[in-house]
Image: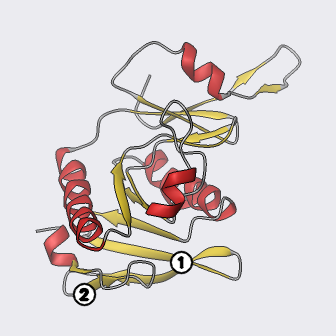
Amino acid sequence: MLAGQNFSMTTGTNEQIQWTSADLALLPDSPNHYEIIDGRLEVTRASHWKHQTTLGRIHTFLDNWSMQTGLGQSIITPGVIFTDTDNVIPDLIWMSRERLAIAVDESGHLILAPELIVEVLSDGTDNIRRDRETKLKLYSNRGVQEYWIADWRSPLLEVYRREQGKLVLMQTLLMNDELSSSLLPGFSCLISSIFA
């Protein structure tokens, strides 16, 4: 399977078969990440090391702030099961302590929308489209309050916030800008620190 590939199965009658969480359990162990969005299987491979470095830095800033305030927790690559046909692995989430207490199933997967989701763009047109369009729509429909998209190549960070029931691009932050959020009181970091 190729990175960023989308798999849809059809029957002999051209009817599309929807993938479900149960189907994921039948897939072999692999270094690939399997996600289901709107019943379609999305497959990605391990990312560029700069992707992982960017993700690690954002996590460090969020995690340090969370430990200082006690307001919530940041989690790298958690399983988020919105429905049986919308099952994703965001790069990073932040969830308040109260929400996290009621958001986890017996397998340790999140079943409620995190307040904040962060995706770091991976190589490839399909991967970029998935984060900027498909996941943006999914996260918007499922009630995520903020969505950050980090692009280490540019480098820039886009901040989407919920406004009138949907996620809307509010800021595009460049190297000299500072990231803050009303969702995270007192949190701030320089974009240059994320992409240094």
Identify the residue at horizontal 63%, vertical 28% (top origin).
Answer: 21
Left or right of 62? Residue 97 is right
The answer for how far apart the CA atoms under marks 2 and 1 are is 17 Å
Residue 75 x, y percent position in the rendering:
35, 51
Residue marked by disc 1: 161
Please identify the quadrant where the N terminus is shown.
top left
Residue 37 x, y percent position in the rendering:
63, 42
Identify the residue at horizontal 58%, vertical 56% (top origin).
Answer: 113
Please name whichever residue, 121 or 75, is drawn nearer the observer in this view of the structure: 75
Mark number, residue 177: 2
Q: Residues within 10 Å of mark 1 (few under 14, many from 20)?
A: many
- Amino acid at dot 2: Asp
Residue 130 x, y percent position in the rendering:
52, 51
Q: Quadrant of residue 133?
A: bottom right
Secondary structure state at the residue bearing disc 1:
strand
Identify the residue at horizontal 42%, vertical 43% (top origin).
Answer: 78
- Amino acid at dot 1: Arg
Between discs 2 and 1, the one toward the N terminus? 1
Please identify the quadrant where the C terminus is shown.
bottom left
Please name whichever residue, 161 or 175, is drawn nearer the observer in this view of the structure: 161
Left or right of 57? Residue 30 is right
